[in-house]
Image (spheres, coloured by chain):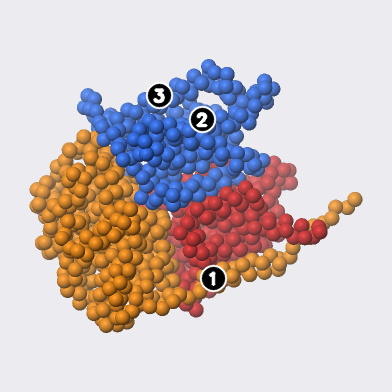
């Protein structure tokens, strides 16, 4: 039971990491930029979810509000920060991205307080179910179900709708897509928008899990997301999914064993560095490093 | 057509531009401050401890206002010279030097975490400056010398008191421990582990987590497997809150005992219904029928927007104590104030009655325990067996 | 001179050494390193252990320099495998690994750090003087390299490895050299820091600090020794001079970083250059 408990923890984490990291891999796949500031989008999503849920009494409205605000923020980041920097080598937008993340983290601290904010009424966090001796919390179930729904929807969107197919085409073969009349700029906005919406959902779920959103919330997940997208193969959504679940499970089991001699955060980075040295193309080798 | 070779501006030009701006900045930095009785104040306004820093700052300011409103000390007003030490050791040293060198301060209240107190203590000791550590619990702070005082129970002592409370008062024997990985969390837990044998406590397993963690899935699953009589966790309210809620969410119903830094309304807010029944060690008794306490409580809540927690209460008390020391010494000379503080007997502070200080300038005072009932802090006992958690002597 | 003035000048000196050495790696040679704090920390811990064990200043300096550069060379090898932004991510990882590892090792002081480190024996003024001398030497070294063939090779490698190869410049060797020199200096700064504080904890060498250092390099003008020196001094003094900056430090640093990259990628040095050019043309 113990090991299944750990597995459930690992999987629900993995699902959350996946929703958070997909945005990162999407941006990389399209623009070859490491959008570290994505963590700020994630954090904003978490804050908005709590604020709106507290103001309206409805957690659903909280999520919806976050899903509207974050794509705007994400697209703005592209337009204002990345677009003019595309002509430089890739570390330039990376440094700018890190600068923005740090700026936003402090901004959250100043605006919302160091203590962070909590849900006034969080039904989810405290409801648990006992299934065959395994304790599963409502949030864990919600996270897993949401992830399944979201990724299925994403898959359908990119394979069944015109916009989605156009998007995939632009990512893999930009010139050909353009010659078919697909506007690459619109695709970029779409890319950031979708990634940001997913991050918002992930943020809201983490807010539920912890019942606390503090300024550092994005930072902690951001470098894990970096590790995940490299492990999964940059630009590959499927790879990101797999890597997320793997990392979630490794962390769940690993903290018990490795936690004695290595910080939990460092574990993700260790995996990342080892992999980059051995196989710079990541697990699925979708793109070169 | 020959391309004009562009002559770069001389190094001298760039240098003088740079130097001028630096000199201006330097001048702005080094301008001296003004008179009155100055008490230095180190608080973590930014960084991971910012939540406590804000509470400490508001409390400190309130204490000064209350003192000045009552006529000040020795006919003079108190001025608080505040610096943000970010709860970091190098900043603590830096701001300590600033207080000594720049502001000419001779009396300091350190309202920050142990990392700061430990770093600043030797600096102040060497300069003959009195420092009261409001809530830094690491033993090294007072070991720096006789100008150091501590107004909170030492970490290891709190841990020992916890062992006494769990073993004797609650009668629970098999305990799973969860330690926060920093000097505060570890020092406190070490004290508990050391004293556990005395009260028949068996530590089933020891787990640890870092300051930044908010997710404890693995620890929770492991504790569940341990099936202990109770769980003892050290940490701050922002780690304890999620931890307790996750422990309860996993179906763990045994009592949970938290360390002093859980003591905050925010803890109840975060943990929600899961907070019910949590014991908090060395948590201050809010129900005490004391006018100063109630006034402090209401005024703080008005200013901060949230109810004061242990950190606020103790910082307020520290400033008040410093003023009292000056009064009794009838002077601001640090050596005299030090002696007056060392001779303190039965001084009323917000948390209760301060018996005094021992030879190492550690405070002697009973430890009160709270339990959370109906979303409020309720007294759950006072440990008066001072020998059980007596601080070390010099 | 007051204790405060001595300590602020000491910190400025240390930051100058760190920023200039980072500039050698990231500015001259174009290898973006966002984990410079790790080499600083490695040097600091090496010096601390040496001082506690032997009390010899000379050995401590040596130990710090060697430890810093060994770690730096290891990372330098990594730079041969991955391209620039992934190198940046790797260096972030190295920083986190360093801090994460040190915090768990009892022999390195763990969470409590190493306290009570024996004094260097020079006193605060002596330490400050030593720091300033080393800072001056670092600046001199940086200027010298910048104008030498090595500097040219660094720049060539930084801008276009392929083109550099056609000139017979082995990218790998020069990248390693840049890392080796830059991190040795960072290690030295770590030793000086240990003399200054006599108490170190891992969190002084974290990723945020590394970002601050990179901010100094970028704002000063990546590649320009003097620009970086001015930025290092200015950005160290700024939080002291202006209260607002001190309270909102990360906001200001992060914001400046974004603004500079976005609007004036050449940093302070670039802005000054453009201003003088404009004046010249008119």
Instruction: Give whichever of discs 3 and 2 has the lower sequence position.
Output: 3
- Name the chain under label 1: B
Q: Quadrant of residue B354?
A: bottom left
Near-viewer residue (A123 or B89) = A123
User: Mark 1 = which residue?
Assistant: B28
Chain colored red: C
User: Mark 3 = which residue?
Assistant: A148
Q: Quadrant of residue B241?
A: top left
For label 1, the crowd category at 10 Å Cα-Cα, with few meaning under 14, some 14 to 19 and many 20 or more, is: some
Q: Colour of chain B?
A: orange
Q: Colour of chain A?
A: blue
Q: Residue at x 36, y 36 (%)?
A: A56
User: Mark 2 = which residue?
Assistant: A194
Q: Are marks 1 and 2 on the same chain?
A: no
Q: Residue at x 36, y 33 (%)?
A: A59
Q: Residue at x 63, y 39 (%)?
A: A83
Q: Residue at x 28, y 34 (%)?
A: A123
For label 2, the crowd category at 10 Å Cα-Cα, with few meaning under 14, some 14 to 19 and many 20 or more, is: many
Element under disc 1? helix
Q: Residue furthest right?
A: B1
- Point out residue A67 in the picture as x, y percentages from the top left corner: 46, 32
């Amino acid at each position: 039971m113990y090991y299944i408990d750990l597995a459930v923890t690992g999987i629900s984490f993995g699902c959350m990491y996946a929703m958070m990291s997909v945005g990162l891999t999407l941006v990389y796949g399209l623009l070859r930029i490491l959008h570290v500031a994505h963590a700020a989008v994630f954090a904003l999503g978490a804050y908005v979810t709590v604020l709106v849920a507290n103001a309206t009494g409805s957690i659903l409205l909280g999520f919806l509000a976050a899903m509207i605000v974050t794509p705007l923020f994400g697209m703005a980041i592209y337009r204002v920060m990345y677009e003019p920097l595309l002509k430089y080598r890739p570390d330039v937008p990376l440094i700018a991205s890190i600068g923005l993340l740090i700026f936003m983290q402090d901004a959250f601290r100043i605006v919302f307080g160091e203590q962070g904010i909590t849900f006034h009424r969080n039904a989810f966090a405290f409801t648990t179910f006992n299934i065959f001796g395994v304790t599963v919390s409502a949030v864990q179930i919600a996270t897993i179900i949401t992830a399944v729904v979201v990724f299925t929807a994403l898959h359908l969107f990119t394979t069944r709708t015109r916009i989605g197919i156009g998007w995939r085409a632009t990512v893999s073969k930009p010139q050909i897509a353009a010659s078919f009349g697909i506007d690459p700029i619109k695709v970029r906005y779409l890319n950031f928008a979708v990634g940001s919406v997913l991050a918002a959902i992930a943020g809201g779920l983490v807010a539920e899990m912890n019942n606390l959103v503090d300024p550092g919330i994005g930072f902690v997940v951001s470098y894990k997301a970096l590790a995940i997208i490299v492990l999964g193969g940059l630009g590959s959504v499927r790879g990101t999914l797999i890597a997320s679940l793997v990392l979630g499970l490794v962390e769940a089991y690993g903290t018990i064993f490795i936690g004695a001699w290595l910080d939990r955060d460092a574990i993700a980075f260790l995996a990342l560095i080892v992999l980059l040295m051995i196989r710079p193309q990541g697990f699925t080798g979708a793109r070169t490093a | 057509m020959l391309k004009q070779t562009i002559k770069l501006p001389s190094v001298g030009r760039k240098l003088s531009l740079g130097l001028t701006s630096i000199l201006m900045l330097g001048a702005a930095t080094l301008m001296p401050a003004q008179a009155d009785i100055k008490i230095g104040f180190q608080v973590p306004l930014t960084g991971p401890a910012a939540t406590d820093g804000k509470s400490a700052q508001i409390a400190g300011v309130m204490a000064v206002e209350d003192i000045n409103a009552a006529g000040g000390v020795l006919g003079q007003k108190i001025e608080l010279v505040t610096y943000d030490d970010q709860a970091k050791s190098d900043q603590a040293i830096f701001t300590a030097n600033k207080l000594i060198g720049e502001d000419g301060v001779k009396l300091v209240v350190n309202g920050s975490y142990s990392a700061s107190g430990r770093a600043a203590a030797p600096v102040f000791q060497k300069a003959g400056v009195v420092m009261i550590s409001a809530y830094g619990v690491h033993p090294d702070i007072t070991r720096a010398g006789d100008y150091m005082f501590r107004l909170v129970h030492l970490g290891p002592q709190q841990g020992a008191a916890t062992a006494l409370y769990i073993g004797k008062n609650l009668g629970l024997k098999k305990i799973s421990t969860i330690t926060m990985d920093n000097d505060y969390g570890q020092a406190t837990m070490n004290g508990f582990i050391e004293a556990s044998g005395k009260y028949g406590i068996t530590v089933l397993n020891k787990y640890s987590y870092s300051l930044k963690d908010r997710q404890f899935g693995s620890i929770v699953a492991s504790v569940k497997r341990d099936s202990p009589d109770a769980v003892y966790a050290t940490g701050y309210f922002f780690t304890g809150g999620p931890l307790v809620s996750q422990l309860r969410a996993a179906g763990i119903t045994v009592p949970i005992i938290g360390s002093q830094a859980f003591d905050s309304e925010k803890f109840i807010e975060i943990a929600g219904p899961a907070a019910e029944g949590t014991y908090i060690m060395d948590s201050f008794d809010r129900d005490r029928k004391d006018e100063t306490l109630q006034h402090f409580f209401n005024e703080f809540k008005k200013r901060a927007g949230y109810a004061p927690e242990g950190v606020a209460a103790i910082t307020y008390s520290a400033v008040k104590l410093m003023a009292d020391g000056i009064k009794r010494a009838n002077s601001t000379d640090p050596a005299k104030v030090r002696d007056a503080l060392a001779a303190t007997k039965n001084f009323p502070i917000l948390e209760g009655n301060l018996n005094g200080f021992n030879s190492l300038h550690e405070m002697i005072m009973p430890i009160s325990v709270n339990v959370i009932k109906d979303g409020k802090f309720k007294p759950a006992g006072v440990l008066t067996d001072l020998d059980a958690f007596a601080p070390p002597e010099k | 001179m007051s204790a405060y003035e001595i300590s602020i000048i000491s910190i400025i000196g240390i930051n100058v050494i760190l920023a200039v050495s980072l500039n050698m790696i990231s500015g001259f040679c174009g290898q973006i390193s966002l984990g410079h704090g790790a080499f600083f920390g490695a040097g600091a811990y090496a010096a601390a252990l040496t001082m506690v064990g032997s009390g010899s200043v000379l050995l401590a300096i040596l130990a710090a320099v060697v430890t810093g550069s060994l770690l730096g060379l290891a990372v330098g090898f990594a730079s041969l495998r991955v391209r620039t932004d992934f190198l940046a991510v790797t260096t972030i990882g190295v920083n986190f690994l360093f801090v994460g590892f040190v915090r768990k090792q009892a022999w390195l002081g763990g969470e409590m750090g190493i306290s009570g480190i024996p004094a260097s024996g020079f006193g605060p003024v002596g330490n400050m003087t030593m720091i300033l001398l080393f800072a001056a030497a670092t600046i001199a070294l940086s200027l010298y390299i910048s104008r030498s063939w090595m500097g040219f090779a660094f720049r060539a490698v930084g801008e276009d490895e392929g083109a550099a190869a056609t000139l017979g410049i082995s990218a790998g060797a020069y990248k390693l050299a840049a890392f080796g020199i830059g991190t040795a200096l960072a290690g030295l700064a770590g030793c000086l820091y240990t003399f200054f504080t006599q108490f170190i904890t891992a969190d002084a060498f974290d990723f945020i600090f590394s970002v601050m250092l990179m901010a100094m390099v970028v704002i000063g003008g990546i590649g320009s020794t003097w620009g970086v020196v001015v930025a290092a001094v200015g950005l160290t003094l700024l939080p002291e001079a202006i209260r607002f900056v001190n309270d909102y430090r990360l906001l200001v640093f992060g914001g400046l970083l974004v603004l500079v990259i976005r609007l004036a990628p050449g940093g302070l040095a670039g802005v000054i250059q453009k201003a003088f050019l404009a004046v010249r043309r008119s």
